[in-house]
């Protein structure tokens, strides 16, 4: 077994420190909360609690074992904005002692991202990392905390950004210690990713704007059937500048190499992806434009056989009858595409694209789409994506930046802040991933409602891997019925088909009460019911869990 946690924590410190040494901490601007720009905000925190589970191993009813779990979760949050650096770091050490079985363990959880400006307006660097607990296989004994990770359930992910509306509650009631993994299933491992990405931005006198980026990602797993890996990516993007009026154009080049280290499952081999794409749009009048696109793909995929290398080109038109709607159509050799944009109001936007490309990974028809609606009290989002990827690449793509609110944002725009493997388990094979996410967030007065739904399909081309799919729905209601007291009530369902003639139906329900004594201290009590109706039935279980916690920040 490998021990990655300590090694990766040391590497995280070194990586995150690298861009900080080059920065001037002095700044005169003000942050949105009144602090001077460039000021460091370091918040240590400590949470202690006790949990009782009547089925700590998530075993069938006739094998259920109860246990009391003592929990101590020290952690720290670091924030900095302005002065050439945007930084967010959240670390929690989940320390668990099982009083009945005598077992103990420490789970590390880290989310970190830093963006530094090294040379004004030109040279920047992103440094990021994550540590999380993920299931090693797709059996039914998956703790509910794993269902909420990226690529997982629509329910537990609601708690990643839980906000009870109480003073300081977001920092005090860290979800890692409340809803994460306590079950002793022997089906959990530590997954870690750290990366660095320097990039250069250049304006060529108004004729063109360009970005050259290099990205290095290192992923590691304590155990399981997934190998440690390194991803290296180089991208070049050039776009027409302000001097072009009727003609706009873009040129992009992409290179990615994935190098997997051998483990008990064997060396899965290395993969490389190369592509270049050029696009042009010539505006004839406000309504009509001429379009052209051409490119070349050259991939060498070790574990995904459905690939065809070659070139493509197409020509077409763009039609914009009004500022609310736009239609682009392309037809040519190895490429046909139709894209529709509809913006009926400033708060509503729909986009859908159908692309039929006969070269590249998984050639054929692929769809992408998104829908966004924002009202006074609610936000509605819908996302659909298709991509050929791997477990290592999904882990590496977990964090890419910091949004306007200072929160890390994810590559797939789902706003998930934790990387992980969901309920699908670990392997080395590449797969075609089709993912649909829908969410509604409603906040009015003291009440908040969150709804999530998802569907994900994973299709493999290797004979040793079976196709997998999962779908589910969940909801959470929070009610701040007193100035310092709030309740929450949530439920969710998820259905998994992990292959090998196995099915899982997970049901989770949570109810709890939180009280903030001061802006720096509070307590929470919660009850969770969790079950799996599995086929075959030896993976079925029922669990009742009661949790009491006291948390503070300093």
Image (cartoon, helix red, strand yellow):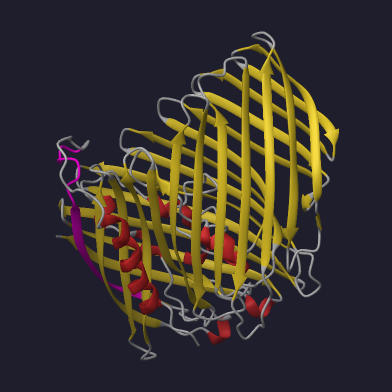
Q: Nearer the viewer, residue 413 or 204?
A: 204
**Image location of residue 58, percent across then percent down:** 52, 78
Query: Does the magenta-highlighted stretch encompass residue 48?
Result: yes
Of the pair 341 and 253, the residue shown nearer to us = 253
Query: What's the residue at 44%, 44% (across, down)?
Result: 200
Q: Nearer the viewer, residue 330 or 88?
A: 330
Position of 329 compared to 545: left or right?
right
Q: Position of residue 315 (x, y in %)?
A: 79, 27
Give the vertical position of 310 relative to 211 (above or below). below
In the depicted structure, whether residue 471 falls above or below residue 267:
above
Q: Quadrant of residue 84?
A: top left
Residue 339: which quarter of the image? top right
Residue 373 in the image: above or below residue 422: above
The residue at 68%/18% (across/down) is: 282
On the question of residue 373 being in view, the answer is: yes
Q: Residue at x 55, y 75 (%)?
A: 228
Tell me what residue is drawn at x 35 percent, y 64 percent: 15
Quadrant holding the C terminus: bottom left
Residue 149 in view in this figure: no
The residue most toward the right is: 333
Residue 532 location in percent, x, y?
59, 69
Hey, which residue is sitting farthest top in the picture?
285
Question: Is residue 450 shown left or right of residue 98?
Answer: right
In the rendered structure, which segment of residues is drawn in magenta? 33-51
Q: How many marks?
A: 0
Q: Is residue 40 magenta?
A: yes
Image coordinates of residue 539 in percent, x first then y, are 63, 77
């Amino acid at each position: 077994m490998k021990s990655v946690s300590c090694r990766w924590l040391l590497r995280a410190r070194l990586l995150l420190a690298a861009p900080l040494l080059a920065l001037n901490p002095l700044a005169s601007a003000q942050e949105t909360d009144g602090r001077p720009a460039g000021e460091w905000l370091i918040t240590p925190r400590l949470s202690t609690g006790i949990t009782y589970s009547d089925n700590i191993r998530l075993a069938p009813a006739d094998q259920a074992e109860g246990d009391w779990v003592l929990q101590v979760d020290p952690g720290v949050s670091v924030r900095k904005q302005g002065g050439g650096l945007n930084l967010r770091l959240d670390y929690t050490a989940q320390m668990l002692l099982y009083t009945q079985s005598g077992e103990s363990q420490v789970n590390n959880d880290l989310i970190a991202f830093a963006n530094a400006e090294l040379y004004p307006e030109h040279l920047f660097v992103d440094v990021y990392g994550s540590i999380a607990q993920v299931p090693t296989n797709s059996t039914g004994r998956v703790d509910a905390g794993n269902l909420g990770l990226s690529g997982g359930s629509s329910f537990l992910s609601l708690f990643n950004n839980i906000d009870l509306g109480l003073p300081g509650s977001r920092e005090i009631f860290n979800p890692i210690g409340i809803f994460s993994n306590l079950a002793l299933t022997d089906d959990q491992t530590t997954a870690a990713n750290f990366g660095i990405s320097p990039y250069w931005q250049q304006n060529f006198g108004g004729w063109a704007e360009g970005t050259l980026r290099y990205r290095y990602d290192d992923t590691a797993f304590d155990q399981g059937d997934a190998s440690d890996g390194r991803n290296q990516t180089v991208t070049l993007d050039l776009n027409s500048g302000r001097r072009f009026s009727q003609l706009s154009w873009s040129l992009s080049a992409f290179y990615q190499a994935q190098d997997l280290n051998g483990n008990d499952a064997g060396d899965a081999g290395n993969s490389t992806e190369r592509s270049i794409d050029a696009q042009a749009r010539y505006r004839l009048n406000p309504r009509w434009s001429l379009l052209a696109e051409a490119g070349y793909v050259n991939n060498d995929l070790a574990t995904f056989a459905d690939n065809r290398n070659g070139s493509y080109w197409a020509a077409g038109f763009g039609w914009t009858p009004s500022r609310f709607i736009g239609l682009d159509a392309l037809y040519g050799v190895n490429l046909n595409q139709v894209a529709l944009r509809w913006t009926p109001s400033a708060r509503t936007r729909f986009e859908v694209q159908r692309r039929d490309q006969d070269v590249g990974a998984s050639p054929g028809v692929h769809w992408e789409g998104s829908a966004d609606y924002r009202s006074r009290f609610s936000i509605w989002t819908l996302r659909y994506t298709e991509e050929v990827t791997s477990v290592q690449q999904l882990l590496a793509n977990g964090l890419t930046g910091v949004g306007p609110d200072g929160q890390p944002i994810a590559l797939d725009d789902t706003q998930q802040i934790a990387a992980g493997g969901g309920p699908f388990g670990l392997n080395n094979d590449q797969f075609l991933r089709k993912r649909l996410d829908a969410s509604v967030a409603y906040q009015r007065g003291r009440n908040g409602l969150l709804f999530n739904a998802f569907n994900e399909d994973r299709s493999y081309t290797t004979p040793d891997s079976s196709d997998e799919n999962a779908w589910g729905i969940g909801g959470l209601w929070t009610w701040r019925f007193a100035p310092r007291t709030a309740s929450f009530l949530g439920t969710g369902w998820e259905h998994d088909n992990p292959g090998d003639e196995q099915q899982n139906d997970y049901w989770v329900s949570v109810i709890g009460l939180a009280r903030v004594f001061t802006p720096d201290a509070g307590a929470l009590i919660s009850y969770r019911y969790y079950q799996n109706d599995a086929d075959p039935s030896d993976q079925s279980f029922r669990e009742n869990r009661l949790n009491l916690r006291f948390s503070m920040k300093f």
